[in-house]
Image: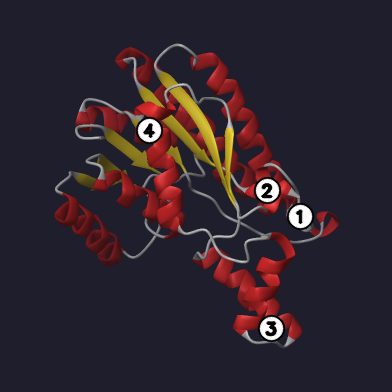
Amino acid sequence: MLKGKVAIVTGSTSGIGLGIAKELAKLGANLVLNGFGEAGEIEAIRSGIERDHGVRVVYDGADMSKGNAVRELIDRTVEKFGRLDILVNNAGIQFTAPVEEFPAAKWDAILAINLSAAFHGIAAAVPQMKKQRWGRIVNIASAHGLVASTHKAAYVAAKHGLVGLTKVVGLETAGSGVTCNAVCPGWVRTPLVEKQISDIAAQKGISQKEATSELLAEKQPSLDFASPEQLGGTVAFLCSAAADQITGTAISVDGGWTAR
């Protein structure tokens, strides 16, 4: 379905981003991976996807906290592949604290990576996509782009902002062959969530299993995690012809979290 298309997935060396990258590769897309990690591990991931799916995969270590670096990532991709069809803005970081104790530096870092990086990537990618008359921008937001939780001021603000940005870009590109949508996952078992489970277990003196159940029961009625593969499938659907008229919207993959 995506043979010959070129996709950038930010924050794709682990977790949700890696799941999305693999699903797009499975459908024939050439990939630009981006994210942090040990060089040997990243190379193993890159060459593994290339081998398994017969697509071209490159790694670009652009720092998502710097706007110019994000724009340069887009430019380098177009230079290298001659096109850019799919941009998945997935890179994200988290920090929790009550608002009055929230460190200003953490606020700035979360806003930069979770929101501003998407803005810079989109601004640089849209002219190329419009020129091709085809493009898919998918912003990985969160259930926290639609509802809030305590102690997550920066994350919730950034993800709400990402949903708002999605709507604006959807309107601005309507009718151009370019679409822009947000995917809003609930709990997904990633290293970020593993840490939250460990924190709950430590704070309450309970097992990892009990902490996991507690985490899910509080927010996710399905009592099960969404998987990176399922989110990859959602992104792949948004890149399909069936989704040509879906733009400027947020799709929840949250086991019922935001239905309450």
Q: Quadrant of residue 198?
A: bottom right
In the image, 176 versus 157, the foreground residue is 176
Position of residue 101 measured from the top left corner of the image (x, y, whole percent): 81, 59
Closer to the eye: label 2 or 4 = 4
Q: Earlier in the sequence, mark 3 or mark 2?
A: 2
- The residue at which mark 1 appears reads as 149
- Mark closer to the observer (1, 4): 4
Secondary structure found at label 4? loop
Give the spatial CA distance, label 3 vs label 1. 20 Å
Q: From mark 4 to mark 3, how far is it between C-alphas?
A: 41 Å
- Label located before the other in sequence (3 or 1): 1
**Which of pointers 4 and 3 indicates the residue nearer the eye?**
4
Q: Residue at x 25, y 66 (%)?
A: 40
At label 1, counting other C-alpha atoms closer than 10 Å, the crowd grade (few under 14, some 14-19, many 20 or more) is few
Comparing 94 with 176, the one in front is 176
Residue on which disc 3 sits: 202
- Residue placed under numbered mark 2 in the picture: 144
Q: Residues within 10 Å of mark 2 (few under 14, many from 20)?
A: many
The residue shown at (74%, 65%) is 218
* Element on which disc 3 rests: helix
Residue type indicated by callout 2: His
Query: In the rendered view, would you say 37 is above or below 2?
Result: below
Residue at (33%, 13%) from the top-left corner?
A: 131
